[in-house]
Image (cartoon, grey):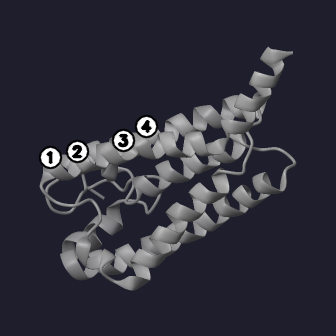
Amino acid sequence: MYSSVCGKFLVEIIGLWIFYVIGYAIAYPLRNWAQKTRGEPFEDPELLAQKKAMIPAMTWILGGFVISLFVPINFGFLFLIGLLLAVIGVIIVGYVFYSFAHNPGLAIRGIYRYSRNPNYIGWTIFFLGLTLIGWSESIWSIIFLAYLVYTICYFYWVVLQEEEFLTNKYGDSYREYVEKTPRYFGKVKDEQS
């Protein structure tokens, strides 16, 4: 009886929030390392200084955490698929930071050779994984699914802001990069074409 009560208590306490926190606990030190190695911030301070970029970013991060506090974990088949996707997402985000650290100026090498926005792909896969980890018939699971949809829309909006900003900052170099490299993923255009 004692063990089943403890087990139930642990399942209720260890909700989706723990995976949310673990993802960020892995990603943010890597981001800080990349910034220190490269000598530049990952997020361009000029873009973040605009309120239209900063307020939605904070709402997105804090909102996801608050929602995850109420999402129970479903230890079934979807949990395993979700855990795999969450790990893949964090690995992609880690490789993004590694590539960023070794790209002076406009990041176009490493994973950036295949996608102009690999960071958003990694985070989307991570949040899709979290959605599956916590998927059940609870209202909070459905709210977290809505958060995933919001995340995809939010990332698309951020990408459009960044593209405008990077075009102004890097000009023809960025336009050439856009011509060769897909926004998210797809076939990279050969440089000889």
Which of the two discs, 1 and 3, labels the residue nearer the N terminus?
1
Asked if residue 127 can be seen in this view, the reply is yes
Circle on res. 91: 4
| Image position of 1 (left or right of 108) | right
Q: CA distance from mark 1 to mark 2?
A: 6 Å
Residue tagged 2: 33
Q: Are marks 1 and 2 in contact (CB under 8 Å)?
A: yes
Q: Nearer the viewer, residue 130 or 164?
A: 130
Which amino acid, mark 3? Gly
Q: CA distance from mark 4 to mark 3?
A: 5 Å
Q: CA distance from mark 4 to mark 2?
A: 15 Å
Q: Report crowding for label 2: few under 14, some 14 to 19, many 20 or more residues within 10 A (C-alpha).
A: some
Which of the two discs, 1 and 4, labels the residue nearer the N terminus?
1
Residue tagged 1: 37
Asked if residue 171 can be seen in this view, the reply is no
Q: Secondary structure at mark 4?
A: helix
Q: Are marks 4 and 2 in contact (CB under 8 Å)?
A: no
Residue tagged 3: 94
Which of the two discs, 4 and 2, labels the residue nearer the N terminus?
2
Which amino acid, mark 1? Thr
Q: Secondary structure at mark 2?
A: helix
Q: Nearer the viewer, residue 158 or 72?
A: 72
Residue at 20% x, 70% y is 173
Q: Position of residue 102 (x, y in %)?
A: 18, 46
Q: Are marks 4 and 3 in contact (CB under 8 Å)?
A: yes
